[in-house]
Amino acid sequence: MSRIASVAQVPKEVREWQARPLDAIYPLVCLDCRQLWSGSSDLLHDTVCTAIGIKMTGEKEVLGFWLTRREDATFKRHILNDLRDRGVRDVLLVCAGGLTDFPEAISTVFPHTRVLPNIVKMVRHSLEVMPWKQRAEVAAGLKRIYRAASTVDAQRHMREFETRWGNDQLPTLQLWRHGWLQLAIFLDYPEHVRKIAVTACDAMETMLSGLHKLRKRQEGLTDGNSTAQMVYLVLSGTRRGWKRPVKHWKSALNHLMDRFGRRIPMA
């Protein structure tokens, strides 16, 4: 995405960017959806779904964004089919756990892809209802769970978390228990691979947080084209900071090559 001088220049560039060919393989992709505004039943689009990919070179890339008012299973399959139609043949890992319908859609379109939880989103949801003075301690407890050396250690840390917080954090415990199967898959990878997944999810969180600016302009975004233009500008501004491969990429790629073998083309 290139630097854009004005909104008036955006429409053609948005269309071309959304239809551009993508790489054949992405070692990791992060998917997430965010509501643009609340109580907007008269608007054409009120939810945006976005995909960030880690390329074979270790660089982050925004693969696309899709607007909808119905965030259902059909829409999720449409997103994945669009990625496939634009050239994506394989994705090794996808951070989309906890998102309704996405794991099922992924298994349909990319049946060999493993689904991991979006750790950053899980932590954010866990902290949203907490008083500020308790958030740091809760976040530290959750970090011990998802950074554990094994599933056994993670279960031990979860029991410690439950002992410390009990009913005060019952929604958080239910969230993490519900996602345990995907969390176990996440813990099956070494630390440097997990860090790549968290990095991609962090980038997604930063990017989508910038969309809160659109809420201030809701009255002027009553059609799909103007909404797409503004979303594109926000994503474009975030993308300018992505200049280098993610940290620990070589170690992570070596592990993925050992694990996934022939699915990764040799250089």
Image (cartoon, helix red, strand yellow):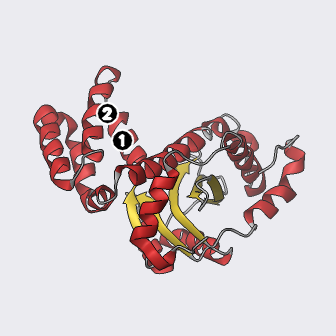
Residue 32 seen from this side = yes
Q: CA distance from mark 1 to mark 2?
A: 7 Å
Foreground residue, 236 or 61? 61
Query: Label for residue 202?
Result: none
Q: Residues within 10 Å of mark 1 (few under 14, many from 20)?
A: some
Disc 2 packing (10 Å; few <14; some 14–19; many ≥20): some
* SS of the residue under disc 2: helix
Q: Is residue 168 left or right of residue 70?
A: left
Which amino acid is tagged 1? Val
The answer to whether one can see residue 45 in this image is: no
Horizontal placement of 192 versus 87: left or right?
left
Residue linked to disc 1: 123
Furthest toward the left, the residue is 163
Q: Position of residue 103 (x, y in %)?
A: 41, 68
The residue at which mark 2 appears reads as 139
Q: Say what secondary structure mark 1 lies in.
A: helix
Quadrant in the picture for the C terminus: bottom right
Q: Out of 156 and 123, give the one closest to the viewer.
A: 156
- Asked if residue 183 lies left or right of residue 16, the reply is left
Towards the viewer: 79 or 38: 79
Report x, y in % for residue 37: 58, 44
Residue 27 horizontal side relative to residue 9, left or right: left
Q: Looking at the image, is 199 positioned above or below residue 95?
A: above
The x and y percentages for residue 76 are 52, 68
Q: Amino acid at mark 2?
A: Ala
Q: Residue at x 82, y 43 (%)?
A: 3
Between residues 155 and 69, which one lies in front from this camera angle? Answer: 155
Question: Can you say whether 169 is above or below 25 in the image?
Answer: above
Mark 1 touches mark 2? (CB < 8 Å): yes
